[in-house]
Amino acid sequence: MINLIKIGTRSSKLALYQANLVRENLKKKFPNIDYSIVEIKTKGDKIQDRNLDRSIDKGFFVKEIQDSLIEEKIDIAVHSLKDLPVENSSIIKTSAILERGNHKDVFLSRSKKKLSEFTKNEIIGTSSLRRKAQLLNINPNLTVKDIRGNVDTRIKKMINGEYDGLVMAAAGIERLGLEGYISEYLDVEIMLNAPGQGAIAIEINSDKSEIDKIICKINHEETERCTFLERSFMDKLGGGCNSPIAAFSSVNGDKICLIGAVLSLDGKVLIKDKAEANKNENVDLDNLLANKILENGGKELIKKFDFE
């Protein structure tokens, strides 16, 4: 019988919020089990003087936590799903994904201006190539610069005048109660989100069936299905967590839809499409959409990533 579950997480305010949310969900289902939170520093937390790029993004915010899981220093690992590499592991499995929060990106600005009001003289901060490419696609004259740090650190940098605006994930801002800084929510037609954005994933060791039986009880099936399609679409394109690839899947009535896009790093080229099916049909929307985009110029565009 399991009496204690050790929850591994990063130590940022947002990561701790997410770990506590997992604990609360588990407590509702299994009130007789004790839960402790173990804070773990990842490479992404330690290295603050380098910008993210495709050569270092795999496991950048999760590897040390996964290592602790494998070494059985913790029983479960909690991550932002969008930070997890898409490659499958034989040692670790995702046992549950919580019901998704807000999937959108938001625009924050010191002056409360909207994105459409920004000029080339104002600096927008983001660490994401996906966001940068979409910003430049909207307006090639925008000045977009890299920014590192957790949510509150980035906002402080904006308040202190290092940046005039930021593009960030709505879910993180909302979970920390920082909505007052939001100038506008960016619709998916303007800023399509990262695959898995807004969802929280819980990993376990693959051979821990007793833990799996507990954790799977808080899985949200619709979120699991939709985020699987998004991440599988990204995988089939050959992209990673920090590639300029975007995707969003949703269930509307009896339909399930997957929208996906890939952009050139400078935002000048955008290839975007969607696929839809009855939610009860066994249709591989991820394959269908990936093939449509690859055949429409995506293959050539992705090849260029390695040379830019």
Image: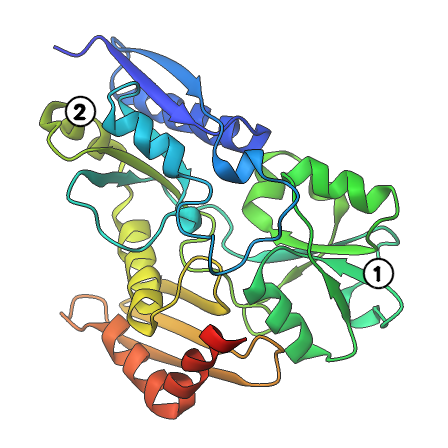
Number of residues whose C-alpha sits closer than 10 Å to that of mark 2, classed few (under 14), some (14–19) or many (20 or more)? some
Picture coordinates of residue 284, whole percent (x, y): 20, 72
Colour convention of the picture: rainbow
**Residue at image coords 13%, 27%:** 208
Quadrant the C terminus occupies:
bottom right
Q: What residue is shown with label 2?
A: 211
Q: What's the amino acid at mark 1?
A: Lys
> Is residue 252 among what the camera can see?
no
Figure label count: 2
Eye-nearest disc, 2 or 1: 2
For this view, does 54 lie left or right of residue 163?
left
**Residue at image coords 25%, 23%:** 71
Nearer the observer, 160 or 32: 160
Picture coordinates of residue 62, whole percent (x, y): 40, 39
Q: What's the amino acid at mark 2?
A: Ile
Is 305 placed above or below 106 here? below
Nearer the observer, 257 or 130: 130
Q: What residue is shown with label 1?
A: 113
Dot 2: what SS? helix
Dot 1: what SS? loop
**Residue at image coords 27%, 71%:** 286
